[in-house]
Image (tube, coloured by chain):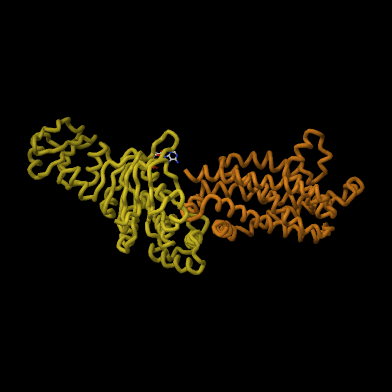
Chain colours: A yellow, B orange
């Protein structure tokens, strides 16, 4: 196996705060790998260590077979980075931002201009090439940051919350571009707190919480391992009634009580619905398939996006 | 060095958009001062009090002060901005560039700005007839040295502290230095106690050396002492800047 990222017991301390508390990772070439977790889980801290801009506090980390502390500069030359907060210069034009970034990698002026035009085409910003960055929408800025991260033709693309704060259309445009990159064989490593994003883009992901990895696998594996096939959601007019784990016997494996609803985890939703109706008199009933959100709820006892 | 030039290119890209405005402030201001002080005020200052026309006296002082001012301005808000507002330093550090290249690239840019301002200013001086020695050519490298003696420590401060420091920095350090470091009158007119403070400023060292150069006949030892003292500010400043940049940017 060609491990592009290899970490064992990786930690990151900020004074007394432990942002990353000893994680193990292996990401292979061509993979789309995700970190799913709530705010403060340690996703960005991990990404910044992988991006060789933040020295690890402990453990081992190898990127592209190299040591990030000793060979940081050489490694960064082969990575593309989309940080959580954009680092574009608002006073410069879209194209100037791309060109100067390419120059940081040592590309010649002629090469970088050509490359900039191709990339602007790719992220659908060609018409805005000579506009300042300032007035661009959030989605456009994000696409520009993605284009910028591709200027050095990186082997690995690191994306920290690529679509947070974007409207649904803008998110779909970004997903579409990332999907194309994945098809071209670029290794994608991304963080998100959207389960749909993780499900759409990631071949494999880890659920991160409190600086540790709670689970690892493909979206399907995680759902199979940590959740049931189906979920029956019961909504009530007032507060959801308190019921025990075994209130429905073998029919229900697990119960989650949320402020406004009850989640019954079951392998047979159709059989459960009439029973639940009769016993609890909910206002409405919904049967759906398990998602990563349910996995997350099971592992951490919290919902992902609050 | 090559990597530092890449960081330098960023600042030039930004400068390309704003150079018209800065030419006004960094050249027109000293020329106005020169006209008002050197010619206006100079006409009522008796020549025998200084032993030379006031214009000749004030011109090299302003040259040193211009170097300081351009360097101070370009090392304050731009550095803070690259860390806090547009965060371009973080963009640079995601590429093969390292902290040392960021510091060097920025100082190269400040040097460029100082150089351009001082050359234009020297041209104005020549036009006013205030240059009397070929040594005056040496004020060009001197202005770089003065500029860096300010740019290096100020960029360390700008990286380290919040932008609230800029107001006191300019009001209580740069401005008094501008007025009392021998720019407009000899520091020997300042009472003892305060005079020693003036001698310790990098600006006075620059002013004194510039004055010897434009008026002719610098003494070698005194000149070397000024150069060494200014170099010390550069070296310590660069060292502090690297520490401050690293502390703020590599976490
Ligand atoms: N530069 C920093 N200094 C101090 N604490 C930090 C710093 N960066 C992150 N943290 C802390 O580390 C923890 C993890 O943060 P982060 O990695 O940003 O999580 P996530 O990206 O999953 O939201 C948080 O408690 C955060 O406050
Ligand atoms: Mg984050």
Q: Is any atom of residue A166 visible in this view?
A: no
Give percent across and percent down for residue A241.
Answer: 17, 31
Residue at image coords 30%, 48% = A194
Residue A152 left/right relative to B57: left
Give percent across and percent down for residue B232.
Answer: 68, 45
Q: In which image quadrant can residue B127 be found? A: bottom right
Q: Nearer the viewer, residue B164 or B44?
A: B164
Q: Is any atom of residue A201 visible in this view?
A: yes
Q: Nearer the viewer, residue B29 or B227?
A: B227
Give percent across and percent down for residue B15.
Answer: 59, 58
Residue at image coords 20%, 33% = A238
Residue B163 left/right relative to B171: left
Residue at image coords 55%, 50% = B100
Does residue B46 lie above or below A281 as drawn? below
Quarter of the image containing the N terminus of chain A? bottom left
Give percent across and percent down for residue B26.
Answer: 69, 54
Does residue B210 lie above or below A109 as drawn? above
Q: In which image quadrant can residue A242 be found? A: top left
Quarter of the image containing the C terminus of chain A? top left
Q: How many marks?
A: 0
Q: Nearer the viewer, residue A133 or A187?
A: A187
Residue B232 left/right relative to B190: left
């Amino acid at each position: 196996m060609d491990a592009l990222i290899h970490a064992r017991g990786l930690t990151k301390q900020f004074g007394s705060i432990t942002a990353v508390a000893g994680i193990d990772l292996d990401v292979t070439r061509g993979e789309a790998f995700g970190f799913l977790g709530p705010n403060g889980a340690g996703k960005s801290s991990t990404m910044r260590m992988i991006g060789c801009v933040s020295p690890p506090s402990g453990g081992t980390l190898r990127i592209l077979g190299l040591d990030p502390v000793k060979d940081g500069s050489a490694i960064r030359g082969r990575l593309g980075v989309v940080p959580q907060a954009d680092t574009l210069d608002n006073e410069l034009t879209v194209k100037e931002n791309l060109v100067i970034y390419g120059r940081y990698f040592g590309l010649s002026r002629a090469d970088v201009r050509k490359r900039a035009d191709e990339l602007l085409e790719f992220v659908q910003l060609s018409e805005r090439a000579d506009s300042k960055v300032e007035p661009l929408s959030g989605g456009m800025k994000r696409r520009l940051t993605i284009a910028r991260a591709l200027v050095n033709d990186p082997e690995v693309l690191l994306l920290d919350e690529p679509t947070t704060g974007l409207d649904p259309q803008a998110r779909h445009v970004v997903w579409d571009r990332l999907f194309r990159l994945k098809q071209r064989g670029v290794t994608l490593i991304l963080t998100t707190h959207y389960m749909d994003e993780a499900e759409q883009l990631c071949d494999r992901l880890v659920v991160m919480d409190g600086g540790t990895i709670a689970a690892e696998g493909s979206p399907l594996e995680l759902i199979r391992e940590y959740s049931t096939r189906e979920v029956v959601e019961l909504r009530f007019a007032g507060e959801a009634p308190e019921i025990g784990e075994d209130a429905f016997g073998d029919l229900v494996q697990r119960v989650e009580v949320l402020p406004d609803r009850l989640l019954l985890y079951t392998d047979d939703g159709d059989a459960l619905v009439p029973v639940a109706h009769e016993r609890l008199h909910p206002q409405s009933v919904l049967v759906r398939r398990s998602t990563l959100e349910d996995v997350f709820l099971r592992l951490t006892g919290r919902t992902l996006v609050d | 060095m090559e990597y530092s030039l890449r960081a330098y290119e960023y600042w030039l890209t930004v400068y390309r958009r704003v150079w018209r405005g800065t030419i006004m402030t960094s050249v027109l201001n000293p020329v106005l001062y020169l006209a008002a002080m050197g010619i206006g005020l100079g006409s009522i200052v008796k020549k025998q009090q200084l032993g030379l026309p006031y214009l000749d006296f004030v011109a090299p002082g302003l040259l040193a002060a211009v170097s300081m001012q351009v360097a101070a301005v370009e090392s304050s808000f731009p550095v803070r901005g690259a860390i806090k507002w547009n965060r371009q330093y973080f963009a640079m550090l995601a590429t093969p560039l390292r902290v040392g290249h960021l510091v060097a690239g920025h100082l190269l840019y400040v040097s460029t700005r100082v150089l351009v301002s001082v050359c234009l200013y020297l041209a104005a001086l020549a036009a006013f007839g205030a240059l009397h020695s070929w040594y005056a050519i040496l004020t060009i490298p001197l202005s770089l040295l003065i500029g860096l003696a300010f740019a290096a420590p100020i960029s360390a401060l700008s990286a380290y502290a919040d932008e609230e420091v800029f107001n006191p920095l300019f009001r209580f350090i740069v401005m008094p230095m501008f007025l009392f470091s021998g720019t407009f009158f000899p520091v020997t007119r300042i009472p003892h106690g305060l005079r020693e403070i003036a001698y310790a400023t990098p600006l006075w060292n620059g002013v004194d050396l510039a004055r010897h150069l434009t008026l002719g006949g610098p003494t070698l030892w005194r000149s070397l002492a000024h150069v060494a003292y200014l170099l010390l500010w550069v070296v310590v400043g660069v060292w502090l800047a690297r520490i401050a940049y690293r502390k703020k940017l590599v976490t």
